[in-house]
Image (spheres, grey):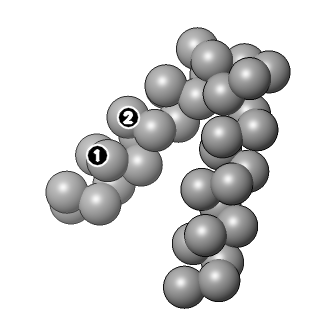
Amino acid sequence: MILLAFRLLLRQHIILLHPNHHLAGHYADRQRLSG
């Protein structure tokens, strides 16, 4: 749970630096979660 929260916070920081990269990573994570 703590690691997940940390990842979410890290992503929010990354979205400020590299929004396009964040979107690509988020999409990849969703694909990985869906199987």
Q: Which mark is residue 31?
A: 1
Question: What is the crowding at mark 2: few (fewer than 14 residues within 10 Å), some, or many (at least 20)?
Answer: few
Quadrant assignment, res 9: bottom right
Q: Position of residue 8 (x, y in %)?
A: 60, 56
Residue drawn at x 74%, y 34% is 14
- Residue furthest to the top in view is 20
Can you say whether 29 is above or below 4 in the image? Answer: above
* C-alpha span from label 2 to label 1: 6 Å
- Residue 24's place in the image compared with 28, above or below, is above
Going 49% across and 26% down the picture, which residue do you hit?
A: 24
**Residue 26 as seen in the image, left or right of residue 34:** right
Label 2, on which residue? 27
The single residue placed furthest to the bottom in the displayed view is: 1
Q: Which of the two residues, 5 or 34, is positioned nearer the viewer here?
A: 5
| Picture coordinates of residue 22, whole percent (x, y) | 59, 29
Identify the amino acid type marked 1: Gln
Q: Quadrant of the N terminus?
A: bottom right
Residues at circles 2 and 1 in contact by the CB criterion of under 8 Å: yes
- Image coordinates of residue 6 in percent, x first then y, are 70, 67
* Secondary structure of the residue carrying numbered label 1: helix
10 left or right of 24 in image: right
Numbered circles on residues, count: 2
- Vertically, is 15 above or below 4? above
Q: Residue at x 66, y 78 (%)?
A: 3
15 relative to 20, above or below = below
**What residue type is disc 2 on?**
Tyr
Residue 19 got which mark?
none
Give the side of residue 20 with respect to residue 31, left or right.
right
| SS type, badge 2 | helix
Residue 21: image quadrant is: top right
Q: Tell me the quarter of the image containing the C terminus.
A: bottom left
